[in-house]
Image: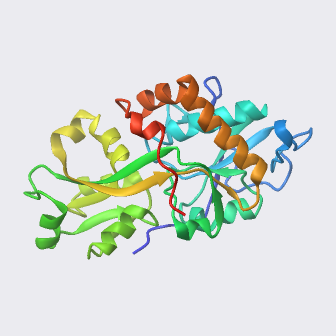
Amino acid sequence: MKTFSGRRTRILAATTATAGLVLVAACTSTGNGGSGSKTAAGGVELVKAGQLTTCTHLPYPPFQSEINGKVQGFDVSLIDLVAKDLGVKQQILDTPFENFKTGAFLNSGECDVAAAGMTITAERKKNVDFSDPYFDATQALLVDKNSGITSLADAKAKKVKLGAQAQTTGEDYAKKQGFDPVSFESSDAVLNGLRTGQVKAVIIDYPVVQGWLKDKANADKFKVADNLNTGEQYGFTVKKGNTKLLAAINKAIKDARADGTYKKLYEKWIGPYNPAAASPSPAAS
């Protein structure tokens, strides 16, 4: 079942190295967010003047999460590069992940871009325009070390209760493999479900699992029982037809790969650099 408790959004301050996180309101504003033109460098039209408004869903480390009072992560850092090129600051809206499939907040003019570790799929392409792929992702099966589970096939044979994050490709994959997964609203809730015994195993993006296992308490208790190569690639999204912003995002990704910035950010947020991730193949149409 779904565990979304509502559609409340939080407006979070721009997350540059010096900017703090501020909870401004429990709902979005229809104003222009300040004086000045909404047209940024390159003729990119923004929903609010002076800022690149990003929809995301927290927490989803290492791509985006609140750390020491700021929203930080791999996705955040890449979109900061786009904002810098446009001559503005990034501001983040924390929104339900279910809206990313439909592009609801992009279409309503509340956000310019969505960045949430989101897999490029044909279904989602019907509603939004994706950037070039910026990350190759796989899924992982995480289990308690004492569970005796050795693989996804083993978990299925033992009829293990399995968890996944709602509205994600991990949940879709679990269903395709014959599971009836318990749906959790966020990645934190997925991990808590495993910790508390609500589920015996979880399927979620491997980079997220990597982040969890950096914590000694998690590493002592849990293990990866199976790596699931699902051929997924992440992309950022914009409202359909927003070609100028899409071009700015693609340029920032390309430049970051070329000048070494991508590698530095990858090592900071993901782990040991995987050269294949820097130049993923074109996303399937």
Q: Position of residue 180 (x, y in %)?
A: 29, 76
Question: With 188 as the anchor, is 94 left or right in this view?
Answer: right
Q: Is 118 above or below relative to 219?
A: below
Say whether residue 14 is visible: no
- Residue at image coords 53%, 60%: 97
The quadrant where residue 28 appears: bottom right
The quadrant where residue 170 appears: bottom left
Question: With 198 as the anchor, is 58 left or right in this view?
Answer: right
Extreme residue in the right direction: 36
- Quadrant of the frame with the C terminus: bottom right
- Quadrant of the frame with the N terminus: bottom left
Question: With 19 as the anchor, is 52 left or right in this view?
Answer: right
Q: Position of residue 269 (x, y in %)?
A: 43, 33
Q: Position of residue 198 (x, y in %)?
A: 25, 64
- For the rendered model, the colour scheme is rainbow
- Residue at image coords 73%, 51%: 112
- Residue at image coords 34%, 62%: 164
Choose between 238 and 285: the one closer to the eye: 285
- Residue at image coords 51%, 49%: 58
The quadrant where residue 183 appears: bottom left
Question: With 143 as the anchor, is 284 left or right in this view?
Answer: right
Q: Is 63 above or below relative to 233?
A: above
How many numbered markers are drawn?
A: 0
Q: Position of residue 16 (x, y in %)?
A: 64, 28
Choose between 121 and 28: the one closer to the eye: 121
Say whether residue 16 is visible: yes
